C-alpha cells in the first residue's frame, strides 16, 4: 500500500447527520494502481460515503479485484466494451446520489482527511459550487515528485469562478488541477453533464468551465491527495496535442467569457500556454530519466 498522508490517522466520525458524499471512480485497466487508490478511499476519516466504481470494459484484473471488495459502501457498475473515457466519467457521475461528488481517477490517491476537509470548506461557504485544493505529484511507485501543486495565482478562501477561469486562460495551465483536487456540489455538476470528450486532454477543464462560470469556488492551499504520473498518464508525444487542445479551450473561453480578454490578455495567454508546454516536456524527460513511469504489476488479489 502507498501511504501519502503525513499525519496520524484520526478517529472516524460516526455522526448520522453528515451529508452523503459520493466518490466515483471510472475504471479501465486500472491495475496495479487501483488497489492503492481504493485503500486510500476506504481510509477516509469521513464516514458517510457511497463509493461507486464504473468498470469501463477493460481486459485486466480490475473487475475481479473490485468484486472481491466487501465494504458495504461500495457499489460497482459495468459499462460495455468500447465505452470512451468521457462516457465512463459521465456514467459514474450520474450514478451518484450524494450531496457532494468527488470523481477520482483510478491511479490517484486521497489523503485520509481529504473528504472531511473539503466538506468542511463547502459547508463554510454554502454559495460555493466547488471546493478546490492542492495535490502532490507522485511517480508510478507513489514517491512524491512535487508537493502542494495547483491553485497557482489563486488566494485561499472564496473566489469567483469567472476569475479562476480567467486565470486558467491567462496562465495557459489548469490551475485547478485534476478531479482528485475537487469536491463538487452535486446539483451544479449534474447540471453540467455530460463530461465532453471532444478535446480529451481537456476533459476536466471543460467541465470546470461549465460548473464554475457565474459561480463561486472555495480554495484550500493545502494538498489533499496525489495525482500519479505514469506511462499511462503522461507522455512526451502528448505535449503537442495538449498544446493544441488547450488553445482550443482558450479560444472557446475567450468567445464565451463575460469579461472578454483584451489584446494583451490574448498575447499573454498564447505565450504562457507555449511556455507551459516546454516546461511539461522537460518534466516528462526528467521523469523518464528517473524511471518514474512504471510500476510492476502485482498479480495476486
Image: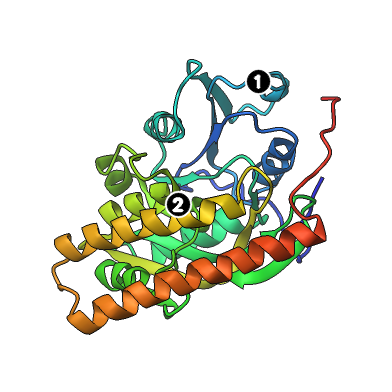
Specify whether 123 is left or right of 254. right
Q: Which circle marks residue 241 in the picture?
A: 2
**In the image as oriented, which residue stretches furthest toward the bottom?**
264
Tell me if residue 98 can be seen.
yes
Look at 77% across and 46% down and name the residue there. Answer: 294
Which picture quadrant has residue 286? bottom right
- The colour scheme applied to this rendered structure is rainbow
* Label 1 Cα crowd, 10 Å radius (few <14 / some 14-19 / many 20+): many
Disc 1, SS: helix
Disc 2, SS: helix
Look at 18% across and 80% down and name the residue there. Answer: 262
Residue 71 vertical position relative to residue 171 in the rendered view, above or below: above
Instruction: Say which of 172 and 22 sits in front.
Output: 172
Look at 43% across and 67% down and name the residue there. Answer: 173
Residue 203 horizontal/vertical position (percent): 40, 46
Residue 113 vertical position relative to residue 96 in the rendered view, above or below: below
Amino acid at each position: 500500500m502507498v501511504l501519502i498522508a503525513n499525519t496520524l490517522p484520526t478517529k472516524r466520525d460516526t455522526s448520522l447527520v453528515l451529508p452523503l458524499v459520493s466518490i466515483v471512480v471510472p475504471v479501465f485497466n486500472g491495475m496495479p494502481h487501483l488497489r492503492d487508490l481504493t485503500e486510500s478511499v476506504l481510509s477516509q476519516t469521513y464516514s458517510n460515503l457511497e463509493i461507486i466504481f464504473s468498470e469501463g470494459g477493460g481486459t485486466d484484473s480490475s473487475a475481479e479485484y473490485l468484486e472481491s471488495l466487501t465494504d458495504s459502501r461500495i457499489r460497482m457498475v459495468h459499462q460495455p466494451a468500447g465505452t470512451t473515457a468521457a462516457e465512463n466519467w459521465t456514467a459514474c457521475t450520474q450514478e451518484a446520489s450524494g450531496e457532494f461528488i468527488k470523481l477520482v481517477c483510478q491511479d490517484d490517491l486521497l489523503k485520509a482527511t481529504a473528504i472531511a476537509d473539503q466538506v468542511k470548506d463547502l459547508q463554510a461557504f454554502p454559495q460555493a459550487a466547488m471546493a478546490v485544493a492542492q495535490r502532490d505529484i507522485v511517480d508510478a511507485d507513489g514517491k512524491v515528485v512535487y508537493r502542494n501543486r495547483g491553485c497557482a495565482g489563486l488566494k485561499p478562501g472564496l473566489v469567483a469562478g469567472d476569475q479562476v477561469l480567467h486565470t486558467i486562460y491567462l496562465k495557459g495551465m489548469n490551475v485547478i488541477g485534476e478531479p482528485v483536487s475537487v469536491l463538487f456540489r452535486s446539483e451544479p455538476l449534474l447540471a453540467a453533464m455530460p463530461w465532453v470528450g471532444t478535446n480529451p486532454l481537456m476533459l476536466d477543464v471543460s467541465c470546470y468551465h461549465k460548473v464554475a462560470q457565474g459561480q463561486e469556488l472555495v480554495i484550500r492551499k493545502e494538498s489533499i491527495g496525489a495525482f500519479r504520473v505514469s506511462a499511462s498518464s503522461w507522455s512526451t508525444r502528448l505535449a503537442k496535442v495538449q498544446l493544441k487542445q488547450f488553445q482550443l479551450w482558450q479560444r472557446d473561453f475567450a468567445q464565451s467569457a463575460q469579461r472578454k480578454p483584451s489584446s494583451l490578455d490574448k498575447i499573454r495567454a498564447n505565450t504562457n500556454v507555449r511556455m507551459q508546454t516546454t516546461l511539461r516536456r522537460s518534466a516528462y524527460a526528467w521523469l523518464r530519466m528517473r524511471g518514474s513511469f512504471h510500476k510492476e504489476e502485482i498479480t495476486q488479489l
